[in-house]
Amino acid sequence: MVKGFVAFRILLVFVVAVSCVCSEKQECRARCKDGRDGRNGRNGVDGVDGRNGIDGFCGKHGINGTNGIDGKDGRNGKDGKDGRNGKDGKNGRDGRDGKDITRKRNWKECAWDNISDGRDNGLIKTCSFSKSEQSTYLYVQVSSNMRIVNCDACCKRWFITFDGKECTPVAIDGVVYMYKGKGSRYKNLHRPRVIAGHCKINKSGRVNVGFNVGNCRSYPPGDAHTGWNSATRIHIYEMEPPQQ
Ligand SMILES: *[C@@H]1O[C@H](CO)[C@@H](O)[C@H](O)[C@H]1NC(C)=O
Ligand SMILES: *[C@@H]1O[C@H](CO)[C@@H](O)[C@H](O)[C@H]1NC(C)=O
Ligand SMILES: *[C@@H]1O[C@H](CO)[C@@H](O)[C@H](O)[C@H]1NC(C)=O
């Protein structure tokens, strides 16, 4: 141990001596032996950051997140189609007793005494009537004295009009015919007669009912006279539609 230490000190002195000699005289370097490696130096300063690397591969899918918060209510939708008809319900209870209904009659009669109208053709009298419903019928009855005189195989016709038109498809009328009535068989027979019938009048409001005289189909006319020395009546009823 002591020996080693002495040797080391001798070596150290020798090395110092040699190094002094060599530092002064370069020529001797060739003769000098290389020294031992020095110790590692200290860590240097950090370098500058490198450039960005290339993008890496895509990662795996992450875990599914939890459900989000419910959104706001949407707007109202459009109306749906009509549904099917439901089944019939059960019968309800009986209702209360109703009031007695009496349909108010609507009628009118126009009457004249002794109109004694000698015309052979045309409108003799009118009676204006106010019809309350469009769907109803009018019943018209005309009574008067009707006559033809002084002719053979002659005919005259009395008939009803509604606003100037006869009832369709069947008119309300009556005819007076005479086979022999002139010369020795002269006849002047004033007689009471009635013509009547129902007619569907497709309107409400004012209807002018007319009593007329004219000619017959297929027969020669004659000398007419209406309402001699007695009453003439135009009687009008408004009637509900008849049974089917
Ligand atoms: C994550 O969500 C996807 C898409 O809805 C679905 O197919 C998958 O099964 C879910 N995974 C899990 C673990 O719930
Ligand atoms: C009836 O009228 C005619 C013609 O106007 C007339 O001549 C006659 O006297 C009248 N008769 C009566 C009873 O009034
Ligand atoms: C009745 O009159 C109305 C118009 O006023 C018409 O539309 C309808 O067809 C008429 N009905 C008949 C059965 O003539």
Image (tube, helix red, strand yellow):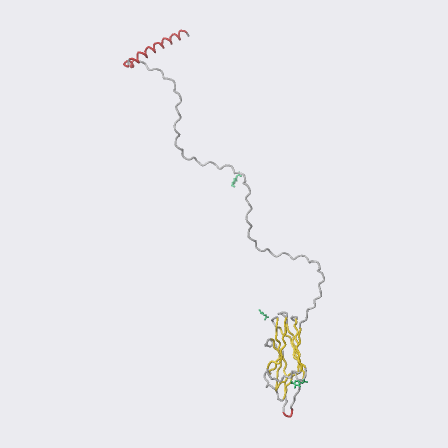
Instruction: Indicate left or right for 48 with 187 as reference.
Output: left
Residue farthest along the left direction in this orientation:
27
Work out whether 4 lies above or below 130. Answer: above
* Residue 180 placement: quadrant: bottom right
Residue 25 lies, in percent from the top left, at: 28, 13
Residue lying furthest right in this view? 97
Image quarter in which the N terminus is found: top left
Residue 44 spot, x, y in % from top left: 39, 23
Q: How many marks?
A: 0
Q: Residue 46's quadrant in the figure?
A: top left
| Quadrant where ligand 3 appears | bottom right
Residue 203 percent across, percent down from the top left: 60, 71
Which image quadrant: the C terminus? bottom right
Residue 55 versus residue 5 in the image, above or below:
below
Q: Is residue 172 above or below residue 92?
A: below
For this rendering, which residue is in front, 86 or 140? 140
Position of residue 88 measured from the top left corner of the image (x, y, whole percent)? 65, 57
Which of these two is toward me, 141 or 209? 209
Q: Nearer the viewer, residue 157 or 55?
A: 157
Residue lying furthest bottom = 184
Task: Tell me where residue 70 sits by quadrant.
Answer: top right
